Amino acid sequence: MLGVFQVWLNYTMLPSEVTTFRMQPFFAQGGILESASVAQAVNDMLLTSQGHGLRLFPIWAALRPTESASFRTLRAKGAFLVSATYDGVARRVGNVTILSEAGVLCRVLSPCPRGAAITITNGGTAVRAKAGPRGWLEFATEAGEAYELAAAWPEAD
């Protein structure tokens, strides 16, 4: 676990030009060093919800691309509980479920490469999503409802 924590700390200190998945270090967000925890480091590698919206596996996929990971019901800003898996062999995100507790607009950075068609459903019914700049998707939610994101991945070259 200390290795994961060290990776997280080093990653948050990288210059912002290095990656689009940057986030501010915990102490720059108003926290103090004593409030940092290994659990927070791991959570931030799997899901971040600061800034524009939800990012799935933002740090994990960048620093440990061949290692698989998954999480269930991590809490995100906007009153969302998010679950997802990352397949390190295929390098794909899947099994994404977002439970909305407050019924607010959900913004998600597409976990798929360009060219992948993403569908969002609620109980099997398609949900209309608006595509934003740089891979962001947004869709309306209702309190207490779960939304599944699925991708039709493009074939490998």
Image (cartoon, helix red, strand yellow):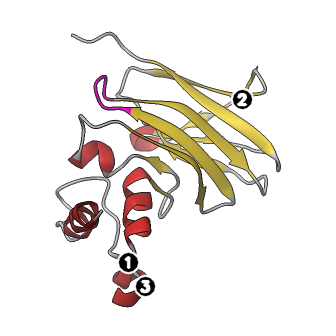
Mark 2 sits on what residue?
A: 127
Q: Is residue 6 magenta?
A: no
Q: Earlier in the sequence, mark 2 or mark 1?
A: 1
> What label sits on residue 26 in the rendered view?
1
Residue 45 screen position, x and y as percent: 36, 55
Tell me how far mark 2 sits from mark 1, CA to CA: 35 Å
Labelled pair 2, 3 in contact (Cβ < 8 Å): no
Q: Main secondary structure of the magenta part?
A: loop
Kind of residue at disc 1: Phe
The spot of residue 72 in percent (x, y) is 57, 46
Asked if 136 appears above or below 54 in the picture, the reply is: above
Residue interval drawn in magenta:
87-91
> Is 89 one of the magenta-colored residues?
yes
Answer whether labels 1 and 3 touch (C-beta < 8 Å). yes
The residues bearing labels 2 and 3 have C-alpha atoms spaced at a distance of 39 Å
Of labels 2 and 3, earlier in sequence is 3
CB atoms of marks 2 and 1 within 8 Å:
no
Give, as a three-letter code, the residue at label 2: Val
Pick out the residue farthest to the front.
Answer: 1
* Quarter the N terminus occupies: bottom left
The residue pinned by badge 3 equals 35
